[in-house]
Image: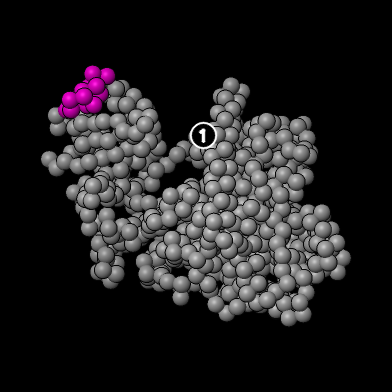
Amino acid sequence: MAKWMVAAKRADFEQIAEKYHITPVLARLLRNRELTEDEEIRNFLFGTMEDMHDPLLMKDMEKAAAILKEKIKNNKPIRIIGDYDVDGICSSYILLKGLRSLKGNVDVVIPHRMKDGYGLNDKLIEDAFRDGIDTILTCDNGIAAADQIRLAREKGMTVVVTDHHEVPYEEKEGERTYILPPADAVVDPKQPGCTYPFKQICGAVVAGKLIQVLTGKVGEEMISFEALATICDVMELRDENRILVKEGLRLMPETSNLGLKALLMVNGIEKKALTPYHVGYIIGPCMNASGRLDTARRVLELFDCDDFKEAVTIAGDLKSLNDSRKLMTEQGVKEAVRQVEEAGMERDKVLVIYLPECHESLAGIIAGRIKEKYHKPVFVLTKGEEGIKGSGRSIESYSMYEEMSACKELFTKYGGHKMAAGLSLPDEASIEQLRTRLNESCSLTDEDFEQVLHIDVAMPLAYADRSFVKELAFLEPFGVGNPRPVFARKDISLLSGRRLGKNHNVGKYRISEAGAVYEMIYFGDQERFDEFLKERYGAAAVKMLYEKGLGDGDMMISMAYYPDINYFAGRESVQIVMQDYC
């Protein structure tokens, strides 16, 4: 159970409600998301692609476009070098499709996760030079590859960087000196001097903005791929990200891209109204599984495919790869938990876990799962082909990139941002050094580790009627930076319950408040909830709850919840979804 914090932000909710023709509760939800200015509220509720920011506000955007136009005009060979995750693949495809539409002489290289590692390396530069490449165009990488870009320039190649990651820096006496790569143009909204108004875009959006400048238009197919990358790279669904994802999810089921259509089909979601869940937990993992267990080039082939039968075959292979990944991930998570608990690592503020037998591609997924369990920053390290490799996932109050920068001499390579990072260490002896340094310098307090559930409104269940639930759709899509609203209520009476699902791990209940009866469902830890009820009311009462039912007022709880519409047998009804309890 988390600590509940009820929002207490003030505003004239009646006035906001009247102005935008919404309920005062929805006005309060907007205020809880720090939306206070008229333009912000209007864009959040009614923003369209017309409200996206001008790409030319990005530093070096005009210069990058001019370089590429000149290269295309003179038929110079251009090589796109991307990355093996969803954002890197989508960025590569967007640039490939866009430059091809301009008759560019272009090819793509996506580094192999295990052979090449993340981003540019000397071998990729040497390969490009040997292949007669004139211009290297990076996407979703390059900002931290100063040495490799210098090598490419020395060999006479032109380099254009498009990226969205943090710019590396050196810090002396509290002063930071940012180290930009010596490229012919660097397009990254996070670089010093860039006036782009919204910095939290992913690599695919940066790539899409470049193609927009080159072609003078935004293609519908590209919107879907930018939305896909935005969700899977866990960007905040605020500002233009929200507009882009909303439009991308609307367009995706009707996509003209045969590969994306096939990926939706093999996962059984081609006819569904898509949400960030479908993209982040079904489509994205299929794409990532390729980069983890095979080669991300396969996904690029899928999106570039012009034969639907072939596309379905590739998509089916990717789904099978992802199914294999799930089993390997579960084994890795179990071993990581065993290590933490047996070695007494629960006392550490930063968890550094070494899983030598784990496939290095799964380190980030396992780190994310362990972070959720212990609510601490987590690094999962594995034995790579050369030295130790790993990934980190963080909590809100810990900037992973900054903390790693403070001990960068330990790494042979590192990079990332506040919430996630990748790294390489020279050998096993460095692991304990890293664990010690990160924990000694960690300034997190007990409060930082406490899980907090932010409650939007303490709201009676009677307010959660069908029209209100439909009004909540104004706030969709939900995700990072725009969480699903959570409400709370005391003194809810449990009347009866039953367990659903193959493993009986879902609870379905009849509940009441002020004499009115509602349907409630709980998808959380069912055993833990039952234990909570037994401790408070006794095993006999819990047995009665599930077998015969109880009287109104016999078993009371406080509940954090959100209302949803349940569709069953052609009928729709309001269903309360419990998030937490006390």
Residue depicted at x 57% and y 38%:
324
Q: Quadrant of the C terminus?
A: top left
Q: Is residue 436 left or right of residue 518?
A: right
Q: Is residue 362 magenta?
A: no
Rendered location of residue 236, percent (x, y): 49, 57
* Magenta span main SS: helix
Q: Is residue 85 visible?
A: yes
Q: Is residue 544 magenta?
A: yes
Residue 181 or residue 406, whichever sits in front: 181
What's drawn in magenta, residue-wise?
A: 539-550
Residue depicted at x 42% and y 42%:
452
The answer to whether 181 is drawn above or below residue 171 in the figure is: below
The answer to whether 63 is drawn above or below residue 541 in the figure is: below
Amino acid type, mark 1? Tyr
Mark 1 lies on residue: 374
For this orientation, the residue located farthest to the left is 515
Rendered location of residue 464, percent (x, y): 23, 51
Q: Is residue 491 visible?
A: no
